[in-house]
Amino acid sequence: MKSTIAVSLTNYLDAGAIVAGASGLTLWQNYLGLSEVHLGWLNFISANCLGAAIGAIIGGFLADKYGRKFIFTYNLLVYMLGVLTGFLITGISVGVGVPASWTYISESSEVNNRGRNICISQMSWGFGPMCILLFGMLFAPGGYLFSWVEQVAALFVGSGSATAAIHVFSSRIVFFTLFVVAFVAWNLQRQLQESAEFTAQKASGQKQPGMLDNIKLLFTNTIAVRTVVFLATIYLTWNLVASVMGFFQPHIYETAGGVSNEQANWMNCIQWFIIVAVTFVVSKLIDKTTHKAIYTFGLLVAIAAWLVIVTIGVNGMVGLWLFAILWGVQGGSSPQIFYALWGSELFPAKFRAGAQGLMFFIVRGLSAVWGLVFTMIYGENGEGFTIAAFCMIALLAISLVVGFIGAPNTRGRALDDIVRERYGDSY
């Protein structure tokens, strides 16, 4: 459990980095004079999209070549540099860490608690945004701690600086909290023992394949390729929706919903609390209940949330709150839980993290492009939000159908047993 919590902090830092940018997005827009398209480009290079995509394909194969502990020892040093300097470096670090963390959790779990441990990791993914949004509200203009922010800003830019320049320091301080958590996580993770499966593979005397060898091995195995297509499809179609909401949701609430920055962050914070609570319930069920039932429930709720947009709308508090609650419920039983679980179950150890890194690269890379398209559909003041909602419903429907048809039966089975059945004894 201790190792699961230590590794799960990677998810806190992943989601936290995305939402840290989101919570202060309007402040940065006012400070830098950015348009909606500019915001799309910020999303494009962030931990939400391109940065994570680049990091994932590198980190996944590095974890298979040098071990999971290798990633834990060095990666968060890059993350700490990133939150002090820029979105792209932070995103790369996020991408490097995620495949190794999900792989390590599965390989370190027993057969009857693997799903639970992945859910614990997912709860950390919910705690990150919840805490970051809470910090954002406390430090935001008008927040309880904003007077302290003004004092900090005065030290760096002077008390006579423009209002927008002072306001944006609330976002800078939020990012610094991620630096502190990353430092704690790094100290915990670098003390972890290497994954038993990776250690056993290394001790077998087999030559450790290089990154290109593993890529070739992955793409020349028909079962592995089919698995990549299946998992990438269910995760991509859901993540195209979730990535937009992760980065733009407070901004959408402010522009399309007409609420203040503080109100938007409060609503989003409560939504993340719902995600954590529902994920906790799912953690009690996932190793005892058919995965297909939980997966289907989550996506039906997700589609219902977007149907609220095209029926009730979000220009009133009823529609806004109904959407926030439903989207929170789906987040606690989302395809990301099953992507993390199945992605570490359905591949052999020699290219397990690499396969996840490849899929993460595909998903976050295409999410980066979609983020740009979304801003064009959405418009400067949310006038295209209904059209965007229909696009979201279509994407979620694809994830629902493909996942329902292709959901594997892996519950309660050892990783070796699953791999042997799928790939034979040679893996």
Image: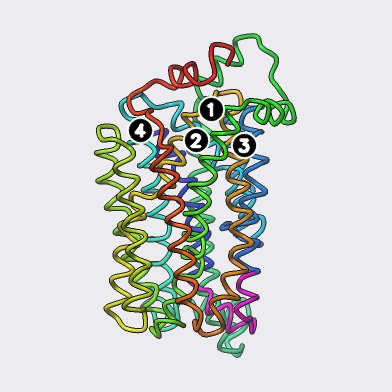
| Distance from Cα at disc 4 to Cα at disc 1 | 23 Å
The correct choice, above or below, for 220 with respect to 158 in the image is: above
Q: Mark 4 points at which residue?
A: 1
Q: Tell me residue 262's x, y (percent).
A: 39, 78
Q: Tell me residue 238's x, y (percent).
A: 47, 54
Pointers 1 and 2 in contact (CB under 8 A)? yes
| Distance from Cα at disc 1 to Cα at disc 3 | 13 Å
Q: Inspect the image, locate mark 3, and give the three-letter code of the amino acid beneath it.
A: Gly
Q: Which of marks 2 and 3 is nearer the N terminus?
A: 3
| Distance from Cα at disc 4 to Cα at disc 3 | 23 Å
Mark 3 element type: helix
Task: Specify the quadrant that holds the N terminus.
Answer: top left
Q: Inspect the image, locate mark 2, and give the three-letter code of the amino acid beneath it.
A: Gly
Q: Earlier in the sequence, mark 1 or mark 3?
A: 3
Mark 2 element type: helix
Nearer the observer: mark 2 or 3; the answer is: 2
The residue closer to the viewer here, 395 or 239, is 395
